[in-house]
């Protein structure tokens, strides 16, 4: 498949001159689960299947288009100085919408800081995602309203929170499940390995959804691992599967299957969504310094949105009115995001003293009072000046 | 019910038992806390009586223990996790500092993490490397955490109850060399507030402020000083975050002299904070600079040297003399 051939064209790691040095372990790249080819052809897979109505397919397409539009708007807002930083999901829409739409309302999601598409699926207002990037808060939504945890910035930490939460589900006798999102770079973190260990030992209903977008800032996957990532699960005692992360249908089918397995009490699954970050890691880096145009172009040919569009058109599942309507919906979303961000007020300066402790803390109280008095002293001098 | 005499270890065990009994959401987690009852037997018998669903033996992975405890707390549980020894907390330090401490603030108060991290700490038991450290200042420095340490059986019993009931994460330092010290515990008493200091011995010439394992040393020093006609007051801080500066200030404004004693290195430690604050608050009451007695700025030494490293009776009395000489 094309996805594999791209990976195969990457330069091999320089082999060590020492005798007996490890060799590249895999002879060939593993099979990806795929249900929709980059050319928009629907194909079958012996283990995974989805049966969606045209309306549901249009829904997935709409989710991806609006998520991309939102993401583009946020990138633009960062360039205009309205956001301090943005972590774009461009190229990862299928992985996020596919997995996000596999969830039930009572499932719980532990995201990284790039899961804007999953947040969309959970019903989090996209403008709420921007507060932390604008610098007005560290997370602008109530995690328990949407069962969507706050973005976690320290790489991989949330996989342990997801595992603990899933252990709690078992204790409660519930049949919901948890999805922990993380990236290929996070797979190098000890916390991710510990999350695999704990989830396996306690048979926790957690799906580890790794979006292998090929790059951890400027570090390629070759700097993170020597075996295909999904194969790691085997060593921890649970299954791993690699799915075409640019195929929304395959991502949906594979995640759904892993969630069902978790609900049946059969424990964790690692899903490696093989995809590509089309943009920068965040607006702070410059991907032209560490990767080639050829690589990006090869992945553009596998664009997740275009392939579903081709399929919808070929099957006549969507007419012109649908696409036009979606375009204006998309523009309206962009406009709303722009307006809300620009109107987002800075927090009150006293806010930094709030929510440090649930039960209060004498030192914080003392410093809050000192700060308030200091602030008030300016008001006094202003009055005197008048 | 009359007070019962028990060791600090037993008081902690009874306290954990009561918490498990009272609140089905309380869980005990850690390495070897199950059948073994912990390497110090603090959780002895709890696995047998409450089962492995409540008293959970974990993989040997400290970050995993704290990280999954956070997840369980997010699901509504109240985990009490044991870090086997002080020097082993560092693999979990990231989870404690970047996640446990910050999630309440990050969520604008929507997420409470009532997790207690129990850490047997301090020296004096002749242990090998990484088994005798006093890292409390590293945790007290982190906003979002509360840090406490009992010095006697009654406080061990009650402070553990209060820590578990707190909606904030609490780092609970247990003075391991005092585990076998006995004291009276009145399980029907009205407990002293968790973050309020206690005057452990009244005096009028000088205040010794200490917590955890050093309170006993300071009480012995006060008794020795009394034989020389010096009246030394001992304040048991009990809490390193927040620190009850009001109680220290009240004592210092009575005695006019302060010596802070802890096992942890003096440099940038709890004593430094107390010295600075009390100097700010009580400058005109002080007859002498605030002195500190503690560990040196060196790695915790091999066991055969720990008697030199740890503040003992003589070093505390020496500081008392120096203060009184001003």
Image (tube, coloured by chain):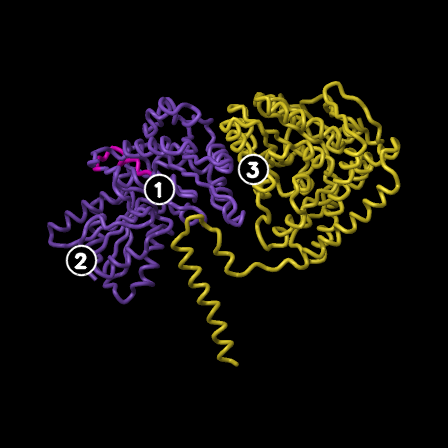
Q: What is the spatial separation of the Cα atoms under label 1 and label 2, in whole angstroms? A: 33 Å
Q: Judge if badges 1 and 2 mark residues of a common chain.
A: yes
From the top left corner, tell me how far across and down residue B76 is, in percent: 48, 36
Q: Nearer the viewer, residue A34 or B225?
A: A34
- Label 1, secondary structure: give it: helix
Task: Rate crowding at label 1 as few (under 14), some (14 to 19) or many (20 or more) other CA atoms within 10 Å.
Answer: some
Q: Quadrant of residue A268?
A: top right
* Disc 3 target residue: A158
| Quadrant the N terminus of chain B occupies | top left
Which residue occupies 17% across, 57% down?
Answer: B204
Label 1 chain ID: B
Task: For marks 1 and 3, give the one nearer the viewer.
Answer: 1
Alpha carbon separation for disc pair 1 and 3? 28 Å
Query: Left or right of B226: which side holds A198?
Result: right
Palette colour of chain A: yellow
> What number is the disc on residue A203?
none
Picture quadrant where residue B12 is located: top left
Is residue A31 depicted above or below B220 in this figure? above
Q: What hue does chain B carry in this figure?
A: purple
Label 2: how many residues lie within 10 Å, few (<14), some (14-19) or many (20+)? Answer: some
Q: Position of residue B62 (x, y in %)?
A: 46, 33
Residue closest to the far top: A46
Which residue is tagged 2? Answer: B205
Q: Position of residue A53 (x, y in %)?
A: 79, 30
The range drawn in magenta is: B173-184
Q: Is residue A314 left or right of residue A113?
A: right
Crowd around label 3: few <14 · some 14–19 · many ≥20 (10 Å): many
Mark 1 lies on residue = B162
Task: Provide the chain ID for the residue under circle 2.
Answer: B
**N-term mark: 1 or 2:** 1
Q: Residue at x 55, y 38 (%)?
A: A157
Task: Report the front residue among A25 and A56.
Answer: A56
């Amino acid at each position: 498949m094309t996805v594999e051939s791209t990976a195969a064209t990457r330069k091999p790691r320089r082999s060590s001159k020492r005798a007996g040095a490890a060799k590249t372990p895999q002879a060939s790249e593993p099979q990806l689960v795929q249900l929709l080819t980059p050319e928009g052809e629907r194909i079958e897979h012996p283990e995974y299947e989805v049966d969606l109505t045209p309306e549901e397919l249009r829904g997935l397409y709409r989710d991806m288009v609006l998520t991309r539009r939102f993401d583009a708007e946020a990138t633009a807002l960062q360039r205009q100085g309205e956001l301090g930083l943005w972590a774009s999901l461009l190229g990862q829409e299928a992985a996020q919408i596919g997995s996000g739409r596999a969830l039930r309302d009572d499932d719980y999601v532990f995201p990284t800081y790039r899961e804007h598409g999953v947040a969309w699926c959970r019903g989090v207002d996209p403008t709420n995602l921007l507060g932390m990037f604008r610098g007005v808060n560290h997370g602008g939504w109530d995690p328990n309203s949407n069962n969507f945890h706050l973005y976690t910035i320290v790489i991989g930490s949330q996989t342990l929170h997801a595992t603990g939460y899933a252990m709690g589900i078992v204790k409660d006798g519930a049949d919901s499940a948890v999805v922990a999102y993380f990236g290929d770079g996070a797979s190098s973190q000890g916390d991710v390995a510990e999350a695999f260990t704990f989830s396996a030992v306690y048979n926790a209903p957690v799906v580890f959804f790794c979006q292998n977008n090929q790059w951890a800032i400027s570090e390629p996957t070759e700097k993170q691992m020597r075996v295909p990532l999904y194969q790691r699960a085997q060593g921890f005692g649970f299954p791993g599967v690699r799915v075409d992360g640019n195929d929304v249908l395959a991502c949906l089918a594979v995640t759904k299957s892993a969630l069902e397995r978790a609900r049946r009490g059969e424990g964790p699954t690692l899903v490696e969504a093989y995809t590509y970050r089309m943009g920068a890691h965040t607006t702070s880096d410059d991907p032209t310094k560490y990767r080639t145009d050829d690589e990006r172009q090869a992945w553009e040919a596998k664009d997740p949105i275009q392939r579903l569009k081709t399929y919808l058109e070929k099957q006549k599942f969507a007419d012109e009115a649908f696409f036009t309507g979606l375009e204006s919906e998309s523009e309206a979303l962009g406009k709303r995001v722009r307006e809300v961000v620009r109107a987002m007020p800075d927090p009150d300066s006293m806010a930094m003293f709030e929510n440090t402790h649930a039960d209060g803390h004498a030192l914080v109280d003392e410093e809050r009072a000192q700060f308030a008095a200091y602030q008030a002293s300016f008001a006094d001098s202003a009055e005197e000046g008048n | 019910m009359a007070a019962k005499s028990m060791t600090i270890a037993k008081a902690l065990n009874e306290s954990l038992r009561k918490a498990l009994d009272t609140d089905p959401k309380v869980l005990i987690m850690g390495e070897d806390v199950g059948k073994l009852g912990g390497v110090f037997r603090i959780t002895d018998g709890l696995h047998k009586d409450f089962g492995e669903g409540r008293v959970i033996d974990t993989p040997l992975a400290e970050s995993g223990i704290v990280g999954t405890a956070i997840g369980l707390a997010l699901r509504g549980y109240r985990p009490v996790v044991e870090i086997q020894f002080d020097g082993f907390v560092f693999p979990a330090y990231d989870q404690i500092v970047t996640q446990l401490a910050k999630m309440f603030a990050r969520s604008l108060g929507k997420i409470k993490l009532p997790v207690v991290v129990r850490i047997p700490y301090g020296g004096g038991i002749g242990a090998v490397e990484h088994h005798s450290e006093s890292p409390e200042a590293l945790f007290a420095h982190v906003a979002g955490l509360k840090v406490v340490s009992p010095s006697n059986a009654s406080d061990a019993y009650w402070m553990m109850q209060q820590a578990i009931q707190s909606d904030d994460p609490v780092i609970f330092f247990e003075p391991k060399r005092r585990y076998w010290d006995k004291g009276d515990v009145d399980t029907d008493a009205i407990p002293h507030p968790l973050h309020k200091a206690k005057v452990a011995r009244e005096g009028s010439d000088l205040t010794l402020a200490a917590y955890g394992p050093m309170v006993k040393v300071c009480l012995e020093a006060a008794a020795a000083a009394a034989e020389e006609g010096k009246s030394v007051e001992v304040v048991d801080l009990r809490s390193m975050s927040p620190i009850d500066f009001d109680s220290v200030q009240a004592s210092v404004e009575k005695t006019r002299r302060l010596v802070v004693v802890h096992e942890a290195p003096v440099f940038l430690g709890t004593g430094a904070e107390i010295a600075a604050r009390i100097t700010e608050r009580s400058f005109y009451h002080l007859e002498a600079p605030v002195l500190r007695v503690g560990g040196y700025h060196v790695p915790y030494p091999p066991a055969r040297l720990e008697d030199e490293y740890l503040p003992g009776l003589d070093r505390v009395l020496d500081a008392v003399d120096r203060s009184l000489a001003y």
